[in-house]
Image (tube, rainbow, N blue to C red):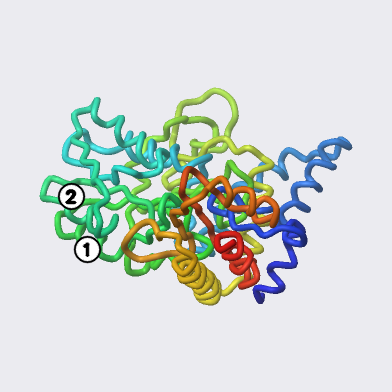
Amino acid sequence: MTPVQFRGLFPALADRVWLDTPASPPGAVPVTQALMTALTDWRDGRLDASEWERAAPATRLAFARYLGVAPRDVALLGSVAEAAATVAASLPATGTVVIGDDEFRSNLFPWLGLRATGCRIVRARTGPAGRTESILAAIDATTTLVAVSHVLSIDGERVDLNRVRAATHAVGARLFVDATQSLGVLRPELASVRPDYLAVHGYKWLLCPRGAAWLVTPHHDELRPLQPSWKSAVDGGYFGGSPQLASNAARCDTSPAWLSWIGAGAALELMSRLLEAAVEEHCLDLSRTFRDGARHAGAVPVGAGQPSHIAVVRVSDPDALRRRLRSSRVQAYLAGDRLRVGFHYFNNHDDVSAALRALST
């Protein structure tokens, strides 16, 4: 599927420039159609609960195929915070956990809670050399786990996961990666990185509704579900009995919000039609073009290290820029003096030009 064909599946793009996918993308037609069909069936009394219930397990297979991992290593959860908290609750209460000081809170607060168990927490403050270097500098012989986001929308830096993986291997530590702001655009390099835990909430670059998230880990036999329920059990029963957890990652499955997973199934089917290398090249090219143009317009890039498909720059007159973005129907995120834009496969160079015109006027 070409970028033009992909763009045609997003009606919102007919009259606006969407650069706010780091917050959430517009709805893709296959996803919204799946949801509207389900809602119509619900309204008209054609709801088939057993069919809706199968939507979440079906995404386990689809997500595993998309990533190239074993379905037995995939748990179905509701958020990255739940994934991180599940892993945190299953860690031994010794050693050191290294996290970025400016991490997204869903991948920060669950680890901070380990202080109460006696675990040492090191918050690596991002320095002028970037997040990768600060994380690497914080790892030592006591480190038992490093938790890091592949990309953070605060500055768009792309953490070098291969270097972080090498550092954790050197001290025998495990690696937890949040790929929510990268998977769907950037290739995860799982074959070389091989994170111990990979968490993804699908409502950003994977185009899913909010509420569908996955945790991938080969260490599922060590995990204790935060919310054990009928979904955690191996026998599929509903009433009575005693907990017999599934022998695979499904032991951590939570009871699914049906509509989220119905939409997620349609989104994964759509994303699987894209060539990963083409998507990454396209989006990085747009981001590079924007950053070059923004510098020429006097904006100052934020962050160091390896750039990604998300670009953040400081601007001198944010109030005026906000008015220009609104009048130009450019959907981007402006907080304080920071402008954040993100480029998906549906974006094009006209979108870049529209954002740069707003910056340059």
Tell us which disc is closer to us: 1 or 2: 2
Residue located 47% across and 52% down the image: 316
Query: Can residue 198 be spotted in the picture?
Result: yes
Residue situated in front as seen by the camera: 256 or 178: 178
- The residue labelled by disc 1 is 166
What number is the disc on residue 110? none
Element on which disc 2 rests: helix
Compute the Cα span from label 1 to label 2: 14 Å
Q: How crowded is the residue under tag 1: few (<14 C-alpha within 10 Å), some, or many (20+)?
A: some
Residue located 20% across and 46% down the image: 144
Is there a contact, CB below 8 Å, between mark 1 and mark 2?
no
Q: Determine whether, in the image, residue 17 is placed left or right of residue 102.
A: right
Q: Quadrant of the C terminus?
A: bottom right
Q: Determine whether, in the image, residue 336 is placed left or right of residue 212.
A: left
Residue situated in front as seen by the camera: 234 or 176: 176
Image height check: is 259 above or below 171?
A: above
> Residue 163's x, y, as percent?
25, 64
Q: Quadrant of the N terminus?
A: bottom right
- The residue labelled by disc 2 is 138
- In terms of sequence position, does the residue under pointer 1 or pointer 2 come before the other? 2
The image quarter containing residue 211 is top right
Element on which disc 1 rests: helix
Residue situated in front as seen by the camera: 298 or 3: 298
Q: Determine whether, in the image, residue 164 is placed left or right of residue 152.
A: left
Identify residue type, mark 1. Answer: Ala
Query: Can residue 68 be spotted in the picture?
Result: no
> Residue 131's x, y, as percent?
29, 55
Identity of the residue furthest to the left in this view: 141
Identify residue type, mark 2. Answer: Ala
Image height check: is 308 above or below 322?
A: below
> Residue 176's x, y, as percent?
33, 50
Q: How crowded is the residue under tag 2: few (<14 C-alpha within 10 Å), some, or many (20+)?
A: some
